[in-house]
Amino acid sequence: MSFRKHTILALTMGACLGINVVAQDARACGGEWYPEVMVDPRIHGVAQAEKQLANGNRLAAAASVIRMLPHIKSLKSKPGSLVGRAERVLAVALSRSQGALPVASEVPLYVLGSWQGAKGGESAANLAWSVAVLKRQAESKSDDVSLKTDLAEAMARVPEQRSEARTILEDLAKRDLIASPEGYAALASLRSQSGDTDGQKLALKRCEAMAKNQDACIIRS
C-alpha cells in the first residue's frame, strides 16, 4: 500500500475514533452519522405544569413540579429560567391551596414532605415560602404586572401582609392591570374584610368576566 493510502486510512480511522469519543451513541463511521440528541424532559414538564395551573388544575401542576424538582426549595434562580418558572408554578399553586398540597396519591410521601401541609406550622411555612419566591421574582422584574398580581394574591393569604397586598392590588386595579381572575378574587376578599361590599362585588364581576372557570372566583381566606 502506498504512503498516500496509508495516510488516508490513518486519517479516516482517527476521525472515527474522534467521533466515538464525542458521541458514543452515534452510528459507526463509514455509514450515515448523526449524534443522539438528549432533550431535558423538564422543559416539556414545566410547560405542561404552567398549562395545568392556567387551566385551574393547581394540585396537578404542583405535584408535577415536585416530582421533577424534589429539591426545588434549595434552588434560587432567575425569573424566566426553567427552575424559576417551576418555582413560580409551585408558589402560586401553594398560595391557592392555602399552603397545603394533598397530593400524596401522586407524589411519594418521602418526596412530598412538608409540602403536604399536614403537620402544625407547615402550611404557614409553605405560604411564607410562596410569598418569598414571588417577591424575589417580582423584585427582579418590577415591570411584570402578572408577577405583581401573583405576589399580592399570595400575600393576601398571610394575615400580617394583607394590608400590603391590598395596596398592590388596588394600585393595579386602578390602572386595570390585575393580570388574573384569582387576583380579582383576592381583591374581593380583601375589600370584604374591610367592609367594602360594593367594592367586593365589583372585583368579583371583573373576576367572573376574566375567568375560564368560575372556581377561580371563589373567595378564599
Image: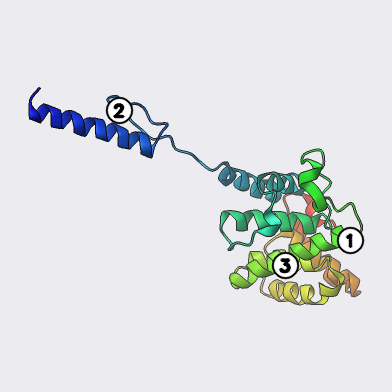
Q: Secondary structure at mark 3?
A: helix
Q: Secondary structure at mark 2?
A: loop
Cα gap from disc 3 to disc 2, whole angstroms: 53 Å
- Rendered image quadrant of residue 164: bottom right
- Rendered image quadrant of residue 28: top left
- Which residue in the structure is indicated by mark 1? 121
Q: Nearer the viewer, mark 1 or mark 2?
A: 2
Q: Is residue 204 above or below residue 46?
A: below
Q: Residue at x 8, y 29 (%)?
A: 3
Q: Nearer the viewer, mark 1 or mark 3?
A: 1
77 vs 194, nearest the viewer: 77
* Disc on the earlier residue, 1 or 3: 1
What label does residue 168 carry, if any? none
- Which residue in the structure is indicated by mark 3? 132
* Disc on the earlier residue, 1 or 2: 2
Q: Nearer the viewer, mark 3 or mark 2?
A: 2
- Which residue in the structure is indicated by mark 2? 29
Q: Residue at x 66, y 49 (%)?
A: 69
Give the position of the C terminus as an image quadrant: bottom right
The location of residue 21, given as percent across then percent down, is 37, 37
Would residue 120 appear left or right of 20 to someone viewing this image?
Answer: right
Would residue 118 appear left or right of 179 to someone viewing this image?
Answer: right
Would residue 90 appear left or right of 113 to someone viewing this image?
Answer: left
Give the position of the N terminus as an image quadrant: top left
The location of residue 211, given as percent across then percent down, is 73, 54
Amino acid of disc 3? Ala
Q: Residue at x 77, y 41 (%)?
A: 107
